[in-house]
Amino acid sequence: MNNLILFLLALLPIAWLMISLGVLKIPAHKACTSVLVIALIEAILFWKMPMLNAATAALEGVVMAVWPIALIIIAAIFTYNLALHTKSMDVIKNMLAGITTDKRIQVLILAWGFGGFLEAVAGYGTAVAIPASILAALGFEPVFAAVICLIANTVPTAFGAIGTPVISLAKIANLDVNVLSYFVGLQLVLFIVLIPLALVLITTKSLKGLRGVVGISLASGLAFAVPQILAARFMGAELPALLGSVCSMAVTIIIAKRMNTKAKMTRGAAQKEIAATNISISFKEGILAWLPYILVFVFIILSSQLVPFIYKPLSNIKSSILIYTGPGAKPYDIKWIATPGTLIIIATVIGGIIQGAKVKDIVTVFGKTLKQLKNSTITVIAIVAMAKVMDYSGMIRSLAEILVTITGSFYPMFSGVIGALGTFVTGSDTSSNVLFGRLQTEVAQSIGVNPTWLAAANTSGATAGKMISPQSIAVATAATGLAGAEGKILNKTLKFCAGYVVLLGVLVYIGSFFIR
């Protein structure tokens, strides 16, 4: 069977995924399960994969999907749901909404800083839904609130949900997670600095709107970018977005308070001032509200390689299981304690108890979280299992060979587009990485480019696709009461996505000559 036919057959599961999700609107958990079945059948029939190898390849994907990927997702949403239950999220919202009356700065604090924080600790729509609803409540036009939060919720998704996308990609593609994190951080630095300026321009619809806030906009971006890249370089994937967003919020709030601005923003010919929320929150109340997230941060730091006398014994609490039975099989390690999901759950339970939640209520919230994420978990399991089958059978290699033939040495320019396409289809940076991560590294090896650099480009490109993903737009319209306006919002975000991936393609292509 020639390479072109194998390429088309290998493309079939991905094409069906796009059609089933994007055109037929089949629920993701059903679409991804059907794609897994197609991949298994093709692997056995056309790539001559023994049935036992195909089954164990899928099983390895199932185990990987459950631990650590789904565990992290469940833990992150559990933390958020418990914050809703204890009302601490209301305190956090009020703290952030009552700082300034300047719309430009409100956008920086809520859509950029707070949205980035929610993406870092939870992801999966919270970073769009909550800031957009707060902005709408503060008087922002609903379509604008939806669009601005979608554009802001781009770069933070790379390390969203305590690093889930990058951790998943490192496992799928067998890459060093610390190096991968650093490369992702490098590729996103420019975007992190530019996006706050872009948010202000979109808010005011004029270059004049930057007057008086260029400094705070740059500071908001740099305060995110510098901690993120340092954390990515020295600490891995779990904390870059969390550190970056918290530092960005803190710096933006401090500068805003010093500016003590009462500027009125112009929208069309009318002027409208948004009154700050006058709710007094004590330092103790603030710390208590943020406590679970503070504990998440502390626990992940203490169990990281930065603290080797804790990291080493915790890392040794693991099980090594040989699951896949075919060529290239390696034992799969399950770390029971030193994994972000476990640490987040422990931190959340402790924080919730200190906040006054009863143990039975915490258990109830956790149970509701499991039920809430049932379909999402099935989706993750199916797509990771499919990726493993495609990888072990040689289907990914068949895709890579033709892509190299078509694009040659210019492929790095298009690597980000593939990542964006993955997020557009699946709605998830993690799913995009799982779907295309091995493809990127296979192509990289074929053209002599650093595989980790192109894998990172998949993550970076996936952040661009987030703003045009139908799932993200659906969350935004639900949060702002705009059901039926999805097409209008997509048209507004599409041009920003296009500019994003073009600039990223140039950066990745140039970087491929220097990163070896």
Image: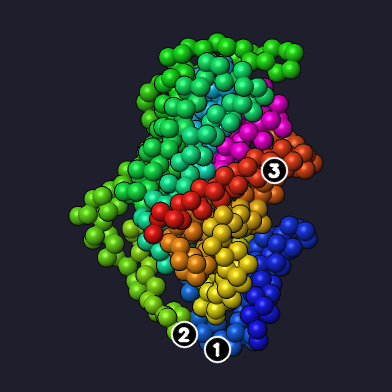
**Labelled disc at residue 326:** 2
The answer to which of marks 3 and 1 sits earlier in the sequence is: 1
Q: Is residue 8 left or right of residue 125?
A: right
Callout 2 amino acid? Gly
Q: What residue is pinned by disc 3?
A: 494
Count of marks, rendered view: 3
Question: What is the crowding at mark 1: few (fewer than 14 residues within 10 Å), some, or many (at least 20)?
Answer: some
Label 2: element kind: loop
3 vs 2, front mark: 3
Using the numbered discs, state the Cα–Cα distance from disc 2 to disc 1 in whole angstroms. Answer: 8 Å
Q: Is residue 470 visible?
A: yes
Q: What residue is pinned by disc 1?
A: 50
3 vs 1, front mark: 3
Residue 338 forms part of the magenta stretch? no
Q: Is residue 74 visible?
A: no
Callout 3 amino acid? Leu
Residue at 43% x, 61% y is 450
Q: Position of residue 397 (x, y in %)?
A: 55, 75
Q: Looking at the figure, which quarter contains the C terminus?
A: bottom left
Camera-nearest residue between 293 and 437:
437
Residue at 26% x, 50% y is 306
Q: Are marks 2 and 1 in contact (CB under 8 Å)?
A: yes
Label 1: element kind: loop
Residue at 69% x, 75% y is 8
Q: Quadrant of residue 340?
A: bottom left
**Labelled disc at residue 242:** none
Q: Is residue 1 left or right of residue 339?
A: right
Q: Position of residue 21 (x, y in %)?
A: 71, 59
142 shown above or below 40: above
